[in-house]
Amino acid sequence: MAVRLNDDPKIVDMIKEGLKKKDGYCPCRIEIKEENKCICEEFKAQIADPDFEGYCHCMLYYKSKD
């Protein structure tokens, strides 16, 4: 299992800028809640799932099975 940043630097830059503007909260979510603080609770659960492979909600991170 490996977690890495998106390969597209434009997406990474855009999401990182959004994170700065929202004090570390997911820029793709409206609610400012602790569970939406990056790395969000949703993606932490997906990381823990051995069968999950894919991007987090905002596409900043990618989890591979290998």
Image (tube, rainbow, N blue to C red):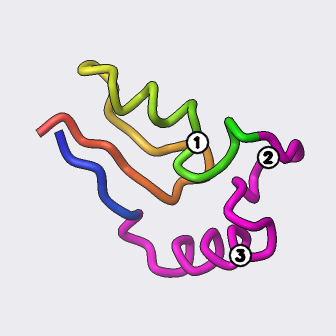
Residue at 68% in and 79% down: 17
In this rendering, is residue 2 above or below 50? Answer: below
Of the image marks 3 and 2, the number of the one nearer the N terminus = 3
The residue furthest left is 66
Question: Which of the 4 image quarters holds residue 55?
Answer: top left
Q: Position of residue 44 (x, y in %)?
A: 45, 34
User: Contact (CB < 8 A) between labels 2 and 1?
Assistant: yes
Q: On the image, numbered disc 1 is attached to which residue?
A: 40
Left or right: 62, with 34 as reference point: left
- Does the magenta run of residues contain 23? yes
The magenta stretch is 6-33
User: How far is the residue under mark 3 from the one under mark 1?
Assistant: 15 Å
Amino acid type for the residue under numbered disc 2: Arg
Q: On the image, numbered disc 3 is attached to which residue?
A: 20
Which residue is at the front of the view, 49 or 64? 49
Residue at 70% in and 54% down: 26
Of the image marks 3 and 1, the number of the one nearer the N terminus = 3
Tally of marks: 3
Amino acid type for the residue under numbered disc 1: Cys
Which mark's residue is nearer the viewer, 3 or 2?
A: 3
Which residue is at the front of the view, 30 or 65? 30
Question: Which of the 4 image quarters holds residue 45?
Answer: top left
Which mark's residue is nearer the viewer, 2 or 1?
A: 1
In this rendering, is residue 16 above or below 5? Answer: below
Q: On the image, numbered disc 2 is attached to which residue?
A: 29
Q: Position of residue 39 (x, y in %)?
A: 52, 49
Q: Position of residue 34 (x, y in %)?
A: 72, 40
Quarter of the image where the C terminus is located: top left
The residue furthest right is 30
